[in-house]
Amino acid sequence: MPDELGYAGPEHLEPAYVAAYDRKQKYDPSADIEELARRGLDDSSTLLDMGCGTGTFALAVAPRCARVIAVDVSPAMVAHVAAAAEARGLANVEVIQGGFLTHHHEGPPVDFVFTRNALHHLPDFWKAIALGRLAAVMKRGAWLWLRDLLYAFEPSEVAIVMDGWFAAAADDPLEGYTREDLATHVRTEFSTFTWLLEPMLAHAGFRAMDAEVDRRRTYARYACVKL
């Protein structure tokens, strides 16, 4: 297995970057939580948040679950989530340093897996293995909620899609992702075309029940059931 820290992006390992991460992300988890509640999330559920980052989702969903397992490869992210969970008195949140390829689940199979903006750090070979490992720790009928930077277009459309994506980038790197941030992502990270990811999901044992693609066609959400 590769060293997943080497794929994480060096900025995610820096405490100063982690401290400013939520401001840059501007992520509100409430809509995702309500969608999962519609699919059966309740106070008996176990949820695995893989690539939990600063724990925005894990900490928000914890009051609705029996058990939340928050996993991230970055020691700085893990320390941040653990401190926040303790400060909020969330005893049902377990914070673990690990990744898609290295985390070893303990306990019964989980009811939900949530992963946001994390799978794109792995090349496709390792993505396929990661999805299989996620499926292996899930109950039959469990839900995978996948959000990520993905490419929902044809290779022939790269220039026009990238021009539109970059044109909407933030000017201030503290307030959002700049053109250079996006260009670095395209050059050095591993977002997958949706028409390649969808067969990977099926091969790992998931059925995609619905999907949403943003208007720029560079971000998607999949709701998948473990078969």
Image: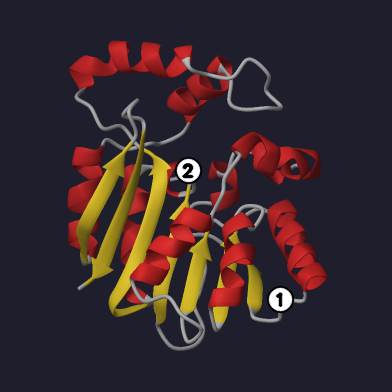
Which disc is residue 90 wearing? Answer: 1
Report crowding for label 2: few under 14, some 14 to 19, many 20 or more residues within 10 A (C-alpha). Answer: many
The mark lying in front, picked from 2 and 1, is 1
Q: Relative to 117, does residue 96 appear above or below in the rendering?
A: below
Numbered label attached to residue 125: none
Of 127 and 213, nearer the camera is 213
Residue 103 vs residue 163: left or right?
Answer: right
Name which residue lies at 42% across and 79% down: 110
Left or right of residue 51, residue 147 in this image: left
Dividing the picture into quarters, in which one does residue 213 lie? top left
Front residue of 97 and 195: 195
Tell me, for residue 121, which label it has, or none: 2
| Whole-number angstrom distance, CA of label 2 to CA of label 1 | 29 Å
How many circles with numbers are drawn on the protein?
2
- x%, y% of residue 179? 54, 16
Quarter of the rendering containing residue 155: top left
Q: Residue at x 29, y 11 (%)?
A: 160
Q: Amino acid at mark 1?
A: Leu
Q: Is residue 174 above or below residue 77?
A: above
User: Which residue corresponds to the image point at 21% horizontal and 67% vertical from the top-left?
Assistant: 205
Among the two numbered marks 2 and 1 on one chain, the one whose residue lies closer to the N terminus: 1
Residue 150 falls in image quadrant: top left
Tag 2 secondary structure: helix
SS for callout 1? loop
From the viewer's perspective, is 187 left or right of 179? Answer: left
Residue 106 versus residue 91: which sits nearer the camera? 91
- Give above or below for 19 relative to 35: above
For disc 1, the neighbor class at 10 Å (few under 14, some 14 to 19, many from 20) is: some
Three-letter amino acid code of the residue under disc 2: His
Residue 111 location, x and y as percent? 39, 78
